[in-house]
Image (spheres, rainbow, N blue to C red):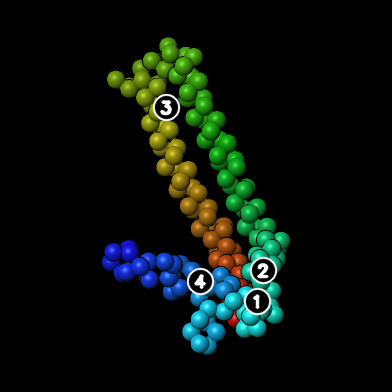
Amino acid sequence: MEKEAGPVTAGARFDDPWDDVPAPGRGERDGAGGPVAAGEPGGERTAPGAAEIYREVHGSAAFREVRRRYRRFVFPAALAFLLWYLAYVVAATTAPGLMARPVAGALNVAMAAGLGQFLTTFLLTWAYARHARLRRDRAALDLRWETQEMTRGAVR
């Protein structure tokens, strides 16, 4: 980037679209165009800082509910998939006769179970996305909106 834009603009940009709220002392101006230092009169905050806001949100009932919904789906699903995968690996190594048994034509048990692994992965991905969309996304977006509003009030 330095070759294209020069050494001055090669650093962090203050108008980064992914940075909703600038960090304290970053991107703020003191009226003369210079950044406000944390110890200067213009740099002091009367509202709670971002750390306090995030601690408050982390302890809120809404945040705990989003985490509870996430965990109630992810932990059982991950455990089930891990057990299914380990059963496939153990069966492949300890029961080669069973895995070599033909199912249909050239398709044997091992190949059917291997294809089942792929199918399970896609089904689990679909189920996770559906669960997130129906059970968590709205609550998480509301929580994020509330946090952003609280943070914007703290930065000003």
Nearest the camera: 66 or 33? 33
Q: Is label 3 in a helix, a strand or a loop?
A: helix
Q: Is 147 located above or below residue 118 in the figure? A: below
- The image shows residue 38 at horizontal and vertical percentages of 62, 75
Q: Identify which residue is drawn at 63% across, 80% down.
A: 40
Kindly report the distance in space between the C-alpha atoms of the residues bearing marks 1 and 4.
24 Å
Which one is earlier in the sequence, the residue at label 4 or at label 3? Answer: 4
Kindly report the distance in space between the C-alpha atoms of the residues bearing marks 4 and 3.
47 Å
- The residue labelled by disc 4 is 20
Kindly report the distance in space between the C-alpha atoms of the residues bearing marks 1 and 3.
64 Å
Mark 2: give few (<14), some (14-19) or many (20+) Cα within 10 Å: some
Quadrant position of the C terminus in the picture: bottom right
- The image shows residue 33 at horizontal and vertical percentages of 48, 84
Label 3 or label 2, whichever lies nearer to me, is 2
- The image shows residue 102 at horizontal and vertical percentages of 35, 17
Q: Please state if 106 lies on the left or on the right of 32 as rendered.
A: left
Q: Is label 2 in a helix, a strand or a loop?
A: helix
Q: Amino acid at mark 1?
A: Gly
Kindly report the distance in space between the C-alpha atoms of the residues bearing marks 3 and 2.
49 Å
Kindly report the distance in space between the C-alpha atoms of the residues bearing marks 2 and 4.
15 Å
- The residue labelled by disc 3 is 113
- The residue labelled by disc 2 is 53
